[in-house]
Image (tube, rainbow, N blue to C red):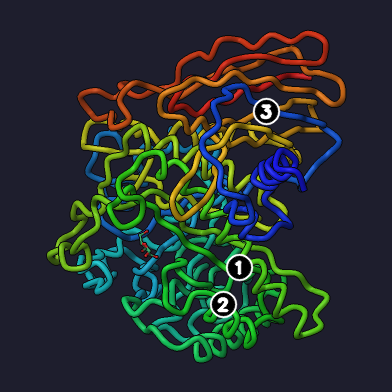
Amino acid sequence: MPSIERRTFLQRSLAVGAGCSAELLLGRLLPAQTASRRTAARIYLDTKRTVAPIDRNLFGSFLEHLGRAIYEGIYDPASKLSDSHGFRKDVMDEIRTLGVPIIRYPGGNFVSGYDWLDGVGPKQNRPRVLDKAWNSINSNQFGTDEFMAWCSAVGTQPLMGLNLGTGTPEQAAALVEYCNVEKGTRWSELRRKNGIAAPYKAQNWCLGNEMDGPWQIGHMTAKEYGYKAADAARQMRYVDPTLKLVACGSSGPLMPTYLEWDREVLEECYEYVDALSLHRYIGNTQQETGTDSSKYLAMNLTMDRQIAETVAVCDYVQGRKRSPKQLWLSFDEWNVWYRARSGDAVNGREQDAPHLLEEIYNLEDALLVGGIVNTLLRNANRVKLACLAQLVNVIAPIMTNSNSLFRQTIYYPYSWGLQMARGEVLNVLADSPTYEVSGIGQVPYLDVTATFSTENGNAALFILNRDLSNSHEVDVVWEDAPHTRVLKSTVLTGSDLKAVNSFDSPTRVVPQDLNKPTTSGGHTKFEVPPRSYSVIQWGA
Ligand code: AHR
């Protein structure tokens, strides 16, 4: 294949993600190239050429009993900012405005030592428990019923985590019974006694958390976990056959058991589950990126690769089992996380709501999060659920203190995915100049995804410009009828990649207007600034 065609094919693959090999995704099959001097990029859009419908759960989030996520974050009965249930009203407003569709709870590492019975019933009877995952006290004043009430108040759905560490399959099935059976059984009657007549009908459940990790309470081998997950899934489905169940996949590509774990687990429980989980945290560290921001902004491509590899294992097991069922992926923890890390498990110091994992995000983190939004979108054919980890105070887009809250930089790209990626993901062909990244290969300066809704005719284009120094001209070629009515044209950018927001300067890094694109003769033209993440939304 001549090199220009090979490059176009690669960039299309990067834009589409699905169905191409990890090597292609990372440019390994390309001949070595030096960074191109051309700065114009072409994006070909055809609203009929689609990848997959976007599941609304693709932009979910996560709240763990960790640090100040629950206590002080969303639940603070002593606060003047809280309602009569003790829920922080300003935080609820923020999450309602975001429109988060699904929230994972109660962990995380926490869940693997959690007894859900400690968190239900009269509050004065609930025990104060030492959570060994984070060495913190859990007063249990917020438990399953409070979480369900909070979910309905903010208009979101629960993604329930189950303890498959110290917990048994029987206890997991009992929680399903507590939540989903209307009446007349031991655990449904306990819920009714606790004042909740109607069942919650929680649909989505995670069978444990990161059970491949030696840090996990109850860590076990893949085979042991696979058996346990299968047993839990069977018992849970006897209680409610409509559940959607997610098995624990590898907790990251650096795990020594990466992919082997996934294969062995699925060999034991494939027929009983609907999905497999992936987790990923990225940092601009010496080890991961050499603290090189150009490489850091390309790291979302390693998530495309992680998805492709995990899909390959799922489909391998499907083939071996001759199963008609294809699994989907739950990317139920993803984010930037590298500063507030060390010693967390011992730093809770047996306190209530200690300050843990309070990462402060800068502009470059937000740009990478924009890239990850693109990665999730272009893999929407297999990734049906994903959770930004986490939502409030703990590695989070929303930070609170006793008087107010502020939006971290990463809030903005996440909110654009939530609010503007609607309908179907388009199979974009993006021809962008590239640059060389060690360990990855040729990387396009522009990372592009697009969506189109047949319901209202809206289209949206999401562009990460990884070029730290140059703006790039963009020529959108509409292969069917051009969209000309711009509804929104916005960009997150700035001169200082390390700039952050704070309580004192909450608007240092905020979206700005992007010059409105102009369209003529089936071409829309505009420029994206260096170091930027932009979204353009058009109406029908
Ligand atoms: O989100 C923070 C922690 O990261 C979670 O508790 C755990 O699942 C992961 O390792």
As drawn, is 9 to the left or to the right of 356?
Answer: right
Where residue 460 is drawn, which disc sits there? 3
Taking depth in this image into account, of 394 and 190 the one nearest to the observer is 394
Q: Residue at x 49, y 74 (%)?
A: 258
Query: Would you place residue 394 above or below residue 374 in this image?
Result: below
Q: Residue at x 75, y 85 (%)?
A: 320
Q: Is ligand 1 closer than 8 angstroms to the Cβ of mark 3? A: no
Question: What is the distance, in whole Å, between disc 1 and disc 2 at their CAs?
Answer: 8 Å
Return the x and y of residue 257 as percentages of the image width and height.
Answer: 46, 79
Crowdedness near tag 2: few (<14), some (14–19) or many (≥20) residues, C-alpha within 10 Å: many
Q: Amino acid at mark 2?
A: Asp
Q: Secondary structure at mark 3?
A: strand
Taking depth in this image into account, of 3 and 444 the one nearest to the observer is 3
Q: Are marks 1 and 2 in contact (CB under 8 Å)?
A: yes
Q: Residue at x 72, y 15 (%)?
A: 524
- Counting residues from the start of the chain, the first of labels 1 and 2 encountered is 2
Taking depth in this image into account, of 180 and 172 the one nearest to the observer is 172
Query: Would you place residue 147 above or below residue 315 in this image?
Result: above
- Counting residues from the start of the chain, the first of labels 1 and 3 encountered is 1
Where residue 310 is drawn, which disc sits there? 1
Q: Amino acid at mark 3?
A: Ala
Query: Which residue is disc 2 drawn over?
Result: 262
Q: Residue at x 29, y 59 (%)?
A: 66
Where, by quadrant of the figure, is residue 362 drawn? top left
Question: What is the distance, in whole Å, between disc 1 and disc 3 at their CAs?
Answer: 28 Å
Can the viewer see residue 203?
A: no
